[in-house]
Amino acid sequence: MTIKGKAYIAGVYEHPTRKADDKSLAQLHAEVARGALEDAGLTKADVDGYFCAGDAPGLGALSMADYMGLKLRHMDTTESGGSSYVIHVAHAAEAIALGKCDVALITLAGRPRAEGMATGTAPRNYGAGVPDVPFEFPYGPTVVNMYAMAAMRHMHQYGTTSQQLAWIKVAASHHAQHNPQALLREVVTVDDVVNSPIIADPLHRLDCCVITDGGGAVVVVRPEIAKRLSRPPVKVLGAGEAPKHQMGGKIDLTYCGAVWSGPAAFAEAGVKPGDVKYVSIYDSFTITVLITLEDLGFCAKGQGGKFVADGNLIAGTGRLPFNTDGGGLCNNHPANRGGMTKVIEAVRQLRGEAHPAVQVKNCDVALAHGTGGSLATRHGSATVIMGRE
Amino acid sequence: MASAQRTIPAPQPTPETQAFWDGTAAGKLMYKVCTACGQPHHYPRPLCPYCFSDRTEWREASGRGTIYSYSVMRRVPVPYAIAYVTLEEGPSMMTNIVDCDLDALRVGQPVRVVFTPTDGGPPVPTFTPA
Ligand SMILES: [Zn+2]
């Protein structure tokens, strides 16, 4: 049993807002849902499967089905932080392959900017009932210093440098200059990145993603439905998902769950890293991209610094174009959860609808990867590989 | 130079972790070992995260370890060092490095446990250069 060829991505939509003072969370979910359905050429009445994660209000799928007026026969609220939506694409394909639904709608939305959330620098307390909290929260773990510890260890073990990490931001900024909706459109240099203030050693301000409101949605459908629609069909080829955690104290910050989700996705898709023309890699921080690329097999372990340096991730000139919308580092990171926008830009590339300045030629196979939670400690990894018809 | 101390929020003990916090109050760093598979773990659980046996028992750690990784949080009112310290007994644990020069920390540095007061709860184990 495989999902290969059993489902197609028929519609995608990225909300244009980056600050949603005047919109509710539920409204944002509904607006992206409508956008993706319009993109597909479908209507709300066609939806019989709905997928959302922890960003949805209230009781998640129940609250949103109520708000949007959906009539469903399948729902899935798998919560894996920012990687959830990559998992949802795979789970939607599984549900469609099993006949549990025909048209699956996946939504993400959030308004951390409007709410003034100190996303990266304030510890989040998930409550005393969470078993790790008494042993972690007192020490002030934040998103940024947790990812910073992974970067620090990678530097120690493999000699990775801040300059090499900076190239990831530089590449993202080269792409974002062509995206009118990107929050940061200015092209930056390696010096700009390493001279920006340190937030948490060794990560600088420009090693960090943006904080934005907004959201996105994806519509996954049965092959028979995809063939009726007018948009270029994008086939789901394979997927993998894996949590990684602290392993009872056998902590290793140098790799992430992509070592498991990646091979599973490649095996199901029947392709190799060398076949992939474009990658969307979750870029909460520069280090997230570097470790993920190594673990997906695009370069040898420990060689990520050399791999990403010298513009090698820049579309048109680099060896592996990534995040051509500008990614979370420059364009958009709605709800502090980047998996959705990773899928959306990969679909644009496969359709040939990326900005002409960053469109990858003959883009027939693309990969999207999500990371949710805290890289290399307690996190979810999800990989989906998609192809053009 | 000694770093300024941030206020550390109180950990909330639970029945399964009470012995750990009784330990910190008495100046002892406790950890769990599974007598079924022989492996130590942290944070402490009644069921071994390796073999799922309930034959886990408390031991006192030496308090010696090395910094596995760390990061100094700079963009906050009182900068502080978060770290994973690998205990001599095996497990690595999240902690803070305190009473130190925040600019002189390094991966692999030997450290020893010290117990730092919290805001109304039991002290937490932190580490300082050995
Ligand atoms: Zn055991």
Image (cartoon, grey):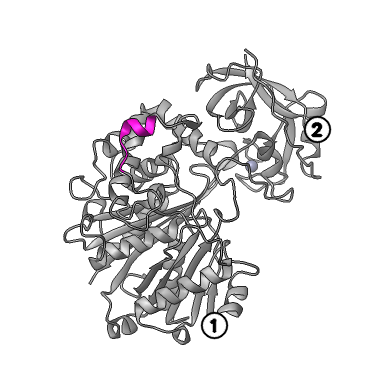
> Which structural element holds mark 2?
loop
Q: Residue at x 31, y 61 (%)?
A: A346
In this orientation, which residue lies closer to the viewer: B113 or B64?
B113
Which is more toward the observer, A348 or A240?
Answer: A348
User: Magenta residues?
Assistant: A187-194
* Up-down relation of residue A239 to residue B13 (above or below): below
Instruction: Look at the picture and state if A173 lies above or below A229.
Output: above
| Disc sitting over residue B122 in the figure | 2
Q: Does B35 sit left or right of A337 as displayed?
A: right
Q: Main secondary structure of the magenta part?
A: helix
Task: Give the amino acid type for the residue marked by disc 2 in the picture.
Answer: Pro
Lateral position of residue A98 relative to residue B34, left or right: left
Where's residue A226, x and y in %?
A: 31, 80
Binning the other alpha carbons within 10 Å of mark 1 as few (below 14), some (14 to 19) or many (20 upward) gives some
Residue type, numbered disc 1? Leu
Q: Chain of mark 2?
A: B
Task: Give yes or no for residue A336 being in the magenta stretch.
Answer: no
Dot 1 lies on which element? Answer: loop
Check if mark 2's residue and mark 1's residue have beta carbons within 8 Å: no
Of the 4 image quadrants, the one containing the C terminus of chain B is top right
